[in-house]
């Protein structure tokens, strides 16, 4: 049984650019420092393999969702940013993961300062190539990281997969929408879910919330059941805007670091282009985002207003990256916001609670949720089928 607070594929799932990316919102080298390089590399490998899981979902359910794939790019402008990503590439190399590509401008001021350990991980290229890859006119960016990426419509995919499940497994699958879960009581042999006047008794429960947790989870004695402090989910709202371009442009996913030091307070700008079918034609939909803010209210209202100041900030700061030929001040075809689940650890939580095996989690998108959520579902299916899985950085603590 799928119990949904609102409607399926609403919220952040229904409001996003649909990027298919497999990076963590935390350097892989940092994850390796905490968990060891093998566990970090295993986690990266599993997320990379979610591309294949997505293709299987689309094929088996007959979903009519285009999946566009291409090379994604990340722009860097100083030595610290570059060295962080080169250290991540060393982890990938040590684990024999598919290699990423990195190019550094021959005009980069820090080129001669890079440690010898990184030799062979990057190529030196003319500054013009950096501009071309990042689709910018200026010379502030000096290096580019490239890796496989893609885009698709996550909202349409969820709705079509749900329809398939309802039709194919009508005798096994039940979907209840507009049913807000308020309380879960986890016992030794069952879990009781309280949702308004309704009660659901189940052998296992999986929490898949994408936002902050506003329901009570406790054992039969009334004691709260929680995750480790750095795995507890809080809400963050991301804001995006998009415009249709009649002239076709190839699909793309490009990110531009704006912090002098990775991990700072200035959000990076991300741009996604994908094919967009309208009722009478097909155009290029160019999406851009960056601003994210913590959310501390008791409830999130999807229809809350988009602050005008934020739309102006996107127009001022992100539009020049998304389409420099677009004049400032033009109206946008879409602007939206969505609630996403973050945690201090920066890593998704996937698996059973260590002391309450009937309670499982697949949550914490940390800004990158499309492919990681699919991998999380696959891992939980293996656990519920009784498979013994090796320890993972995703394990609940």
Image: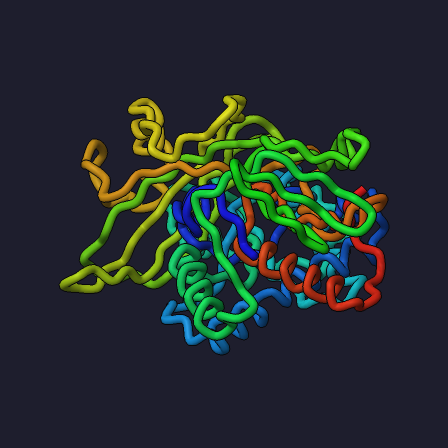
18 lies above or below 306: below
Quadrant of the snapshot with the C terminus = top right
Q: Classify the position of the N terminus by image quarter.
A: bottom right
Q: Nearer the viewer, residue 355 or 266?
A: 355
Task: Give the colour scheme shown.
Answer: rainbow
Task: Measuring from the top left, give residue 335's x and y in whole percent.
Answer: 30, 38
The residue lying toward the viewer, choosing from 346 and 326, is 346
Number of on-image labels: 0
In the rendered view, tell whether residue 361 sits above or below residue 315.
below
Residue 238 location, quadrant: top left
Q: Residue at x 54, y 22 (%)?
A: 296
Question: x%, y% of residue 63?
Answer: 41, 71
- Asked if residue 230 is positioned above or below residue 274 in the image, the reply reads above
Q: Position of residue 71 (x, y in %)?
A: 49, 63
| Residue in view at x 14 percent, y 63 percent | 280
Q: In the depicted view, which residue is nearer to us: 25 or 249?
A: 25
* Image position, residue 302 (x, y; %): 38, 35
The answer to which image quadrant residue 222 occupies is top right
> What residue is shown at x 82% (from left), y 63% (from top)?
389
Q: Residue furthest left?
A: 280
Q: Is residue 28 visible?
A: no
- 350 on left or right of 357: left
Rendering quarter of residue 38 = bottom right
Asked if residue 313 shows in the view, the reply is yes
**Which residue is at a point 27% across and 42% down the rendered structure image?**
334
């Amino acid at each position: 049984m799928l119990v949904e607070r609102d409607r399926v594929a609403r919220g952040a799932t229904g409001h996003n650019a649909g990027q298919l990316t497999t990076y963590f919102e935390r350097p892989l080298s940092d994850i390796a420092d905490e968990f060891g390089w093998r566990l970090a590399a295993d986690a990266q490998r599993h997320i990379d393999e979610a591309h294949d899981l997505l293709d299987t979902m689309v094929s088996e359910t007959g979903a009519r969702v285009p999946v566009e794939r291409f090379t994604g790019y990340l722009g860097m402008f100083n030595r610290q940013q570059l060295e962080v990503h080169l250290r991540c590439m060393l982890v990938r190399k040590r684990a024999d993961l598919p290699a990423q590509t990195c190019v550094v401008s021959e005009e980069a001021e820090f080129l001669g300062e890079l440690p010898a350990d990184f030799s062979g991980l990057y190529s030196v290229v003319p500054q013009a190539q950096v501009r071309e890859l990042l689709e910018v006119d200026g010379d502030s960016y000096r290096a580019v990281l490239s890796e496989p990426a893609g885009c698709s419509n996550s909202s349409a995919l969820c709705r079509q997969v749900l329809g398939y499940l309802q039709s194919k497994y009508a005798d096994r699958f039940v979907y209840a929408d507009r049913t807000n879960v308020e309380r879960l009581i986890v016992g030794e042999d069952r879990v009781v879910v309280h949702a308004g006047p309704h009660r659901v008794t189940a052998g296992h429960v999986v929490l898949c919330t994408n936002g902050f947790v506003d329901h009570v989870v406790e054992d039969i004695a009334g004691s709260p059941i929680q995750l480790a402090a750095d795995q507890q989910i809080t809400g963050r709202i991301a804001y995006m805007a998009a415009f249709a371009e009649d002239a076709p442009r190839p699909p793309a996913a490009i990110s531009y670091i704006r912090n002098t030091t990775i991990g700072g307070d200035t959000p990076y700008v991300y741009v996604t282009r994908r094919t967009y079918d309208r009722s009478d034609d097909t155009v290029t939909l160019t999406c851009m985002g960056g601003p994210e803010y913590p959310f501390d209210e008791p409830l999130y209202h999807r229809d809350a207003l988009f602050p005008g100041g934020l739309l102006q900030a996107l127009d001022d700061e992100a539009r020049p990256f998304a389409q420099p030929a677009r004049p400032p001040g033009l109206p946008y075809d879409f602007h939206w916001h969505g609630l996403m689940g973050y945690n201090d650890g920066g890593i998704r939580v996937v698996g059973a609670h260590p002391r309450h095996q009937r309670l499982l989690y697949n949550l914490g998108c940390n800004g990158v949720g499309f492919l990681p959520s699919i991998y999380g579902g696959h891992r939980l299916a293996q656990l519920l089928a009784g498979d013994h899985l090796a320890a993972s950085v995703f394990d609940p603590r």
